[in-house]
Amino acid sequence: MPIELKPTLDFENYYKSIGYEIIAGLDEAGRGPIAGPVVAAAVILEQKNIPSGIDDSKKLSNTQLKKLYFEIIKSSNVGIGIADVECIDSINILNATKYAMNLAGSMLSKKPDMLLIDGNFTINNQIKNVPIIGGDRKSLSIAAASIIAKYIRDEIMKKFEFIYPSFSFSKHKGYPTSLHFSEIEKFGIIELHRKTFKPINKDKK
């Protein structure tokens, strides 16, 4: 059975060794669902006070996610950016993700000189960008950002489900499922659905 490696500070330590001082990890939650916003987070870890147990948010239980969210918020420099459904439908999900990530970076109280980004794209031409595919499994800063982004988006979607009880929005955490499609078939499309996403764009009412 292959050994699953946990995120490390290897990227952060390497770039600090060649002169970069303030390194932020960035990740998002909510690119795949057909409803709700995309939420991005930027995290600068305080290397002398890093919470233990940080990992790719998808590997954590809800209890672990909540605990680490509050520990990271308390010990680290954190910025949040949100792109709502209107933004996603206006500029597409990739550009909305970049917008949310740039917004998250701008909310940091320290200006980073290096951005470690989960994905295969860059977001900001004024700061050094390092895209890392699967970054939430490799970089501790990105993993911390994935925890912040996922926790916040999950909480937002829980509130939307309270407002719209006909829809299981608290389960819109990844890619759409047959449950989501059956609810749309039964109750129609509302403002929280991404009208440019398939199959929503085919069934627009």
Image (tube, grey):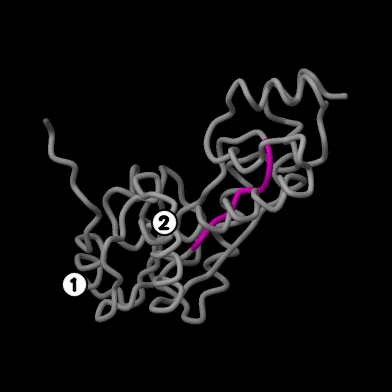
- Most extreme residue toward the right is 205
Residue 144 position within the rendered picture, expressed as x and y whole percent measured from the top left:
38, 61
**Viewer-side residue, 65 vs 100:** 65
At horizontal 47% and vertical 65% (from top left) the residue drawn is: 42
Numbered circle sitting on residue 17: 1
Determine contact: label 2, label 1, CB under 8 Å: no
Disc with the residue nearer the chain's start (2 vs 1): 1
The image shows residue 94 at horizontal and vertical percentages of: 58, 42
- Asked if residue 172 lies in the magenta stretch, the reply is no
Kind of element beneath mark 2: helix
* Residue at x-position 77% and y-position 46%: 86
Question: Quick check: 73 above or below 90?
Answer: below
Q: Which residue is mark 2?
A: 63
**Which quadrant of the figure has residue 16?**
bottom left
Q: Secondary structure at mark 1?
A: helix
Residue 185 position, x and y percent, is: 77, 19
7 left or right, relative to 64: left
| Mark 2 to mark 1 CA distance (whole Å) | 35 Å
Eyeballing the image, is 108 above or below 136?
A: below
Q: Which residues are magenta?
A: 35-41
Q: Residues within 10 Å of mark 2 (few under 14, many from 20)?
A: few
Please state which amino acid type lies under the numbered disc 1: Ser
Number of labels in the image equals 2
Pair 2/1: label in front: 2
User: Would residue 92 appear left or right of 90 to someone viewing this image?
Assistant: left
Q: Is residue 116 above or below residue 166?
A: below
The C terminus - image quarter: top right
Q: At 67% across and 36% down in the image, what residue appears?
A: 168
- Residue 136's disc number: none
The amino acid type, in three-letter code, at marker 2 is Thr
